[in-house]
Every structure is written in C-alpha cells, then in structure tokens.
Image (spheres, helix red, strand yellow):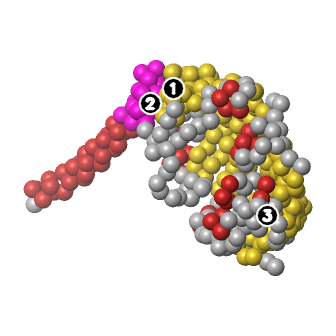
Amino acid sequence: MTEEVTLLERRPKHRIAWWRWIVSAVMALLVIVGTALLIVDTDIGHRFVADRIAAIKTANGLRFTVGRIDGSLYGDTRLVDLRVYDLEGLVFQAPNVTLDWSPFDWFSNRLEIRRLIVDRAILTHTPRTRPSKSRGPILPDFDIHIGKLSVGRLALAKRVLGTERIGTLEGRADIRSGRALVDLKARVAGSDDLKLRIDAEPARDRFDLDVAAKGAAGGVLARMVKAKGPVALAVTGDGSWAKWNGRANGIVGTTRVVDLALAQVAGRYTLSGTLAPSSLLKGAAATADGTAHPRQRQCGVRQPPAGRGAFAPNARAGDRHDRHRRSRCERVS
C-alpha cells in the first residue's frame, strides 16, 4: 500500500518536469530565431544579404548588385549603389534607393511596399534580356501593394534615344483579388508624357480607365511602336463596373490609326470602330495597298487596314482565377 501511494505521488511531478522541458525548448528556439533575426539586421548581416543578391542569376540574364545596405531590413531600408546588369553589361544604376516595406507580409503571399523612392538614377541603354522559353501569366500569383513609387531624376543615356534626356516617374499600385489599381505618371523632358489610371473594384461598383500619352518623333513611345513620326494615344470614358463606355483614339504622325468605341459590362469588354495599322507595318508584312499579310493574324482574324472588330475576353477583370483564360476575337462586318 505504501509503494502505491508513493508511485501516485511521483507521477504528477514527472508530468510537470516534462512540460517544463517543452516550454524551455520552445523558449530556447525563440531566442535562437530572434538572435538570428537581430544578427541579420546588423552590418555583418547586411553584407551577407548583399552578397546573396549578387549571387542571384535570373533566367532572363539580369543580375543585381548592392554596394551597401543601411537602415533596417525589416522596415526602412536604404540601398546604396544599386546596379542592374543585362546581357550587355551595366544597364541601370541608382546611388540611393529608399525602401519602406513589410517583408513579413510575404508569408501571407503579399508584397507590401509603402514607399519606393529613387532620388536619381541612370539608364545606360535599352535593356536586352534573354528570351524566356516558358510561357506564364503576365501578373504574378501574389498580391502587390505599392503605396508610393517615385523616381525623381532618371537620366537616359545617349544610347537609349540617340540624345541624352531626363525623365521622371511617379505611381502607386494595388493589385489583388477583387481589386486592381494602377496610377502612373511618367515624363521624359522634350519628348514623352504618359498618364495611366486603372481602378477596378467590382464589390464597390468601381471602374475607371484613363490613358493619355504623347510622344515626339524619336522618343520613347515612338520607338516602342516603331513609328517615325510623333504618336498620341487617348483613352477616356465614364461609368462604373456595372456599365462603362469610352473611346480610344490614336494618331501616328498625321494619320489616325485608332478610333474605337470601348465598352465594359460587368467585366466583359467589347470594342468597335476603325483600326488602321498599315502605317506601322513594313516590308513583306504589308502589301502596297496596306492590307496585312496573313501571318499578321491574331486570334484567327486578319488585321485590316481599316475595319470593325469586337473583342470579348472570357476573363473578367478583378478575378484572379480567370487571368490565364484565352481571349477570342470576332470579325464584325
């Protein structure tokens, strides 16, 4: 009887010791993790992170280096001497970059950047990357929030446009399921101006699309569309997510190449009007009368020098799961 009482008295003490061991192990693990996080956010840790960035090799050939990391990796980060290299060498350089972000939000599949400020930078030439062999979605499969993006002075070297230019950039973005906001303003002194705003949020019956772009001959926009003369594009409209109507007008040189009526009804887009791409087609791609060669087909529809068309994508804006669906084009007589 005495031995049984003794065993009963010892069991609770053994259980208490077991739970104390578990708590002690968890506390020790937290201390180790916390210490590691603190060490990473020191000068030695910053150098380690910078070395790891330089060791990254992307599939398209881009490489990145950071001369020094100041501030904190977990919030207000300052990158000193940020450089980007492409297949031809140094393509972009920024002496100072301020990054105010929340890295731990990445565990929630979200890129949270409150501020990304670049006081001055230089683009040495038009980026040249290695073509991707795999085909994937345009938008990444995670949420993106950029509260403020600012490039105060972007110097475009002579190799970019044939003459040195100075550009500026400001914007913000909020891209997630059920919400798409992009607000961007860019300017290249003496050649280009761009204003872009897309604001779609079905839950709040919101849809806003405005684009205004003007580019001089030899500017960035003209080079993008391979036009010899000045270019201008304007997209305006009015309405909401339930129903929105607008127009798109584009001019290259003195020729109106785009004159379309746009409509959006609950995420379904349509367009109709005049499209005259013959002024942009060269060589065997176009005949003497401006008719597109059959190899210029898109979605099974031959591009006419001037005609009517309708575009009705199966995917609806704001729905992440429908992003990868294919669009269909229909020729309207």
The magenta stretch spans residue 36: yes
* Position of residue 318 in the picture relative to residue 325 (left or right): right
Q: Identify the residue at horizontal 87%, vertical 53% (top origin).
A: 255
- Tag 3: amino acid: Asp
Q: Identify the residue at horizontal 35%, vertical 43% (top origin).
A: 26
- On screen, 125 above or below 200? above
Tell me the quarter of the picture where residue 90 sits.
Answer: top right
Q: CA distance from mark 1 to mark 3?
A: 54 Å
Pointer 2 residue: 54
Answer yes or no: do the residues labelled 2 and 1 have beta carbons within 8 Å?
A: yes
- Tag 1: amino acid: Val
Label 2 residue SS = helix
* Among numbered discs 3 and 2, the one appearing first in the sequence: 2
Residue extent of the magenta highlight: 31-56
* Among numbered discs 1 and 3, the one appearing first in the sequence: 1
User: Mark 3 or 2, which is nearer the eye?
Assistant: 3
Tell me the quarter of the picture where residue 33 sits.
Answer: top left
Answer yes or no: do the residues labelled 3 and 2 have beta carbons within 8 Å?
A: no
Residue 316 visible in the picture: yes
Measuring from the top left, give residue 122's x and y in whole percent: 65, 26
Residue 8 or residue 116, whichever sits in front = 116
Q: CA distance from mark 3 to mark 2?
A: 53 Å
Pointer 3 residue: 289
Label 1 residue SS = strand
Answer yes or no: do the residues labelled 1 and 3 have beta carbons within 8 Å?
A: no
Q: Mark 1: few, some, or many residues within 10 Å (few <14, many ≥20)?
A: many
Pointer 1 residue: 66
Label 3 residue SS = loop
